[in-house]
Image (cartoon, rainbow, N blue to C red):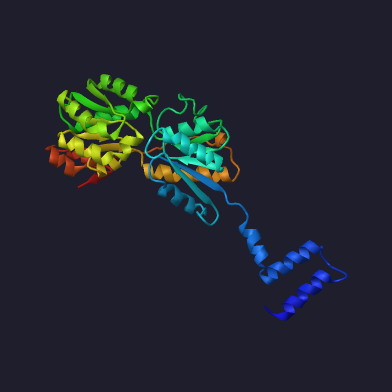
Amino acid sequence: MSLSLVLWCRREIEGSAPSAPLSMRVLVCLIALGSPALVVAQSAVPRPRIGLLTWGACEMPDLIAGLRDLGRIPGKNITIECRSAGKQYEGLATATAELVRLPVDVIVSESQPAGHMARSITKTVPIVTILSGDPVGSGLVQSLSKPGGNLTGLTYYATELTAKRLELLQEVVAGISSVGVLANPVVSYLPFEEDTKQAAQALGLALVVRQVREPGELGEAIHQMKAEGAQAVFVLPDLMFAHEAKRIADLAVAERLPLMAWGGWFTEAGGLIAYSADYATLVRRLAVYVDKILKGAQPGNLPVEQPDRFELSVNLRTARTLGLTIPPEFLARADKVVE
């Protein structure tokens, strides 16, 4: 640092006829001298704090990628806090309460059960989430166009999707008349099971419903489905089922049962078919909501979005293992084929 710069600052601060207020002259000198005090002051500016509410692993890579696209970099201009439910539904309440106590500026989750729990814990902290049931019917939002309250996000579920999945299963498994349904009673407040029963009745399908609360119950549930005449497994949306996708797919193959699920990761794991929105894109899109809220938007004024495109995925390797021939016209419509 040059002596002349130091002397100039001294004259500016102590001069008898200052041309600017003392505080301004001090600030100019601090900038010129590269003051550590100024650096500390700048670093002390609080970063927006985003709370992630997760089921298992404390990570949301697609959300973080979306935030980076918007110039919000963890550790640089935002702070990420994460709390996991420990793969237990009852853990969602504890995890949410911890985020609220920190506090955080916004809570983000990837599922309706997590968003539902967050909404029951706080009516003030903004919540951005993916909704998989009926957000209006459940009381989470007033309407999709104007949610009201402190929760918003995206919804990928509609009643007609259940019927569509069963129809796709009928196309692939010729002559199917009975379907085994995996349902978790912990989320019975969501409409999945009732929608499945109504759709199956309209399509002339009998159902063998098995309620499964814990991963350890999956093997017996799928075995009993087969014993009771089920010709396929239909997996309803659930956080535990999503985490156990590989195990469910393996159990279905072991029982020689084609599997239809709501998420593309099931076909990656060995399930036969899935029909769903692109989940990774939905999670990435949540970043846009977070960004708007951090800029001052009220969640109750941000419309809940719905995807306009759904993807069909098929696992041909599993089809061969099960001795099924997938119709060429069906394969032509598939967005992803696992060989």
Give the farthest residue toward the bottom.
3
Give the residue drawn at x 29%, y 39%: 244
Q: Who's the residue at 59% across and 40% down the image?
A: 297
Asked whether the viewer can see residue 313, the reply is no
Query: Of all residues shown, which one is farthest toward the right?
Result: 16
Q: Would residue 337 appear left or right of 139 to someone viewing this image?
A: left
Residue 281 vs 44, above or below: the answer is above
Which quarter of the figure has residue 278?
A: top left
What is the count of numbered marks?
0
Q: Quadrant of the N terminus?
A: bottom right
Q: Nearer the viewer, residue 201 or 73?
A: 73
Q: Quadrant of residue 207?
A: top left
44 relative position to 339: left or right: right
Point out residue 7 in the picture as x, y percentages from the top left corner.
77, 77
Position of 144 with respect to 327 (left or right) is right
x and y, in percent, of residue 101 in the image: 55, 40
Residue 232 pos. (x, y %): 20, 30
Towards the viewer: 162 or 235: 235
Q: Is residue 56 visible?
A: yes
Quadrant position of residue 262: top left
Farthest left residue in view? 323
Task: Please name whichever residue, 58 or 295, is drawn nearer the observer in this view of the structure.
Answer: 58
Vertical comparison of 65 with 167: above or below: below
- Along the viewing direction, whichever of 20 and 49 lies nearer the viewer: 49
* 231 sits left or right of 167 in the view: left
Q: Is residue 264 above or below residue 180?
A: below
- At which x and y percent is residue 301? 56, 35
